[in-house]
Image (cartoon, rainbow, N blue to C red):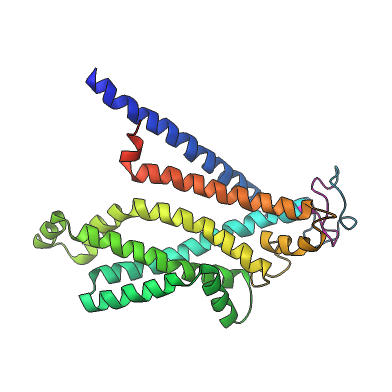
Amino acid sequence: MSETALIAPSNTGRQRLSWTFLLGAGLIVLHLVIGLSTLLWTPYDPSAMAGGRLELPSLLHPLGTDRLGRDLLTLIMIGSRIALIVGTGAVVVGAAIGVTVGLLAAFASRTLDDVLAAALDIMIAFPTLLLAMLIVAASDGASLWTAVVAIGIANAAIVARLTRILAKRVLAMDYITASRISGTSWIRVIVLHILPNIWPTLMVNLALQFGLAIIAESSLSYLGLGAPPPNASWGRLLQEAQGTVYTAPLGAVAPGIALVSLVIAINLLADGLRDLADPTRRTRA
C-alpha cells in the first residue's frame, strides 16, 4: 500500500508534465513544418504583388493581402522560418560564448572570477534589445545574421552567469575532489562530471532564451534593424501594418498571433523541461 502511495503522485506529475511538454512541442513542430515548407513551396512569390492592396481574406488569399498587394499568408509562413533561424542561431551563439566564459570563471582564480562576475553583471544590466541594437549599429549594416549574432552575444552573459554558478556548485562536491586525486584531468572532469550535471538546468534557460531571441529579433525588425526585405520578419510585418491597423487589422493581428503562439509554445516546452530537470516537481501531488 505504501509503495502504491509513493508511485501514484509521481505518475500524476508525469501526466501533468506530458501535457505541458507535448502541447509546447506540438506547436513548435507546427511552426517548424510551416517554416521548412517555405524552402520548397509558398502559395505565392513573397516579393510579388499577388493581388490588390489590402484585400480581405478570400479563397485566393486566406489572410488577405498587405498594403503592397503581397499575400499575407505567404509572408507569415516565411516569418516562421526566419523566427526559427534567429532563435536557433542566437541560442547556439549565446550557449557557445556563455558556457565557455562561465566555465572559465568557475575555474579562474578568485581575483579573475570577481572581475568576470562583475563584467557579466554589467552586461546583464543592459537590456538585451538595447545591447543588440548597439551591436547591430556597430556592424556594417542590418542583416539576418547580424541580428542573430547580436542577440546571441546579448544573451550570452545570462548563460555565462548561470554556468558559473552551476559549475562552482558541482566543483564543490566531494566526488570531484576524489576524481582529481585519482588523476582525472580537468578536461575530463568538465566533460564527464560538470557538463552532464549542469546541462539539464542550462537547457531550461536556453529554451527561454530561444523565445527571448525571437522577441528581440521582431523588435529589431520593427525598428528597421533586423532582417532587411525581402525577408518577411514578423516584426517588419507589424511595422508595415501599423499605418493600416484600423482599415485592415488582419495585417497586424496575423503576425502578432504567430509571434505569440511560438513564444507561448517555447515557454510551455521550457516548463516541461524544468519538470524533467527538477524531479521534486514530478513528485508533487
Does residue 15 appear anywhere in the picture? yes
Q: Residue furthest right?
A: 52
184 relative to 54 in the view: left or right: left
Residue at (58% x, 70% y) in the render:
147
Q: Could you say which quadrant of the image residue 168 lies in?
A: bottom left
Residue 148 coordinates in the image, percent (x, y)? 55, 67
What is the x, y in percent for residue 152?
Answer: 49, 67
| 224 to 212, vertically: above or below | below
Q: Quadrant of the N terminus?
A: top left
- Please state, as top left, top right, bottom left or bottom right, where the C terminus lies in the image: top left
The reply to whether the magenta stretch includes residue 188 is: no
Q: Which residues are magenta?
A: 61-72
Q: Nearer the viewer, residue 233 or 40?
A: 233
Determine the image quadrant of residue 238. Answer: bottom right
Residue 9 lies in quadrant: top left
Q: Residue at x 56, y 82 (%)?
A: 138
